């Protein structure tokens, strides 16, 4: 997710066991004057509104170890998984 989103405007939570929900709101920004190097903007438009996405996580997800990071408008979510017998068989060295 890229854009002008602040950390306090995004909520990441687990629901119904292993459903990850990411929701939040983009705040409206328009009609303000901005300077960018030698250019001068007299009007800037930004999308605003709420958003929500739900992801069904695999059964072998380590829910206690989920990590989230929001940096420069980009949300990264890492969901570690437990190693299964099937994963061990498919691993090549």
Image (cartoon, rainbow, N blue to C red):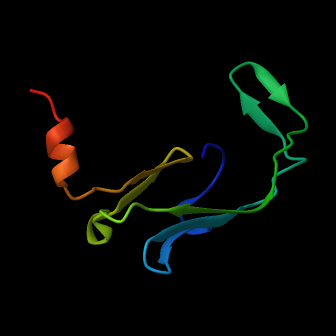
Q: Which residue of the protein is positioned furthest toward the top in this rendering?
A: 38
User: How many numbered discs?
Assistant: 0
Residue 72 point in image, percent of width and height? 52, 44
Q: Quadrant of the C terminus?
A: top left
Q: Is residue 60 above or below residue 41?
A: below
Name the residue located 28 percent from the left edge and 72 percent from the top edge.
64
Please indicate whether residue 59 sits to the left or right of residue 51 in the image. left
Q: Would you place residue 80 above or below residue 63 in this image?
A: above
Q: Residue at x 75, y 32 (%)?
A: 35
Q: Is residue 28 above or below residue 17?
A: above
Q: Nearer the viewer, residue 79 or 45?
A: 79
Quarter occupied by residue 49: bottom right
Q: Position of residue 31 (x, y in %)?
A: 90, 47
Q: Residue at x 82, y 27 (%)?
A: 40
Residue 20 percent across, percent down from the top left: 50, 67
Q: Residue furthest bottom?
A: 16
Using residue 57 as the reference point, say whether residue 5 is left or right of it. right
* Relative side of 30 to 19, left or right: right
Coordinates of residue 10 in the picture (x, y in percent): 58, 65
Query: Which residue lies at the image location 65% right of the left edge and 66% below the top edge?
Result: 24
In-front residue for pair 21/34: 21
**Is residue 27 or residue 21 the one in the foreground?**
21
In the picture, measured across the screen, residue 57 lies left or right of residue 59, that is right
């Amino acid at each position: 997710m890229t854009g002008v989103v602040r950390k306090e405007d995004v909520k990441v939570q687990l629901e119904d066991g292993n459903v990850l929900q990411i929701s939040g709101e983009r705040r409206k920004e328009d009609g303000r004057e901005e300077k960018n190097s030698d250019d001068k903007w007299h009007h800037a438009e930004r999308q605003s509104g709420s958003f929500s996405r739900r992801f069904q996580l695999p059964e072998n997800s380590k829910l206690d170890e989920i990590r989230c990071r929001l940096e420069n408008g980009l949300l990264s979510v890492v969901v570690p998984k437990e190693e299964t017998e099937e994963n061990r068989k498919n691993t090549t060295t």
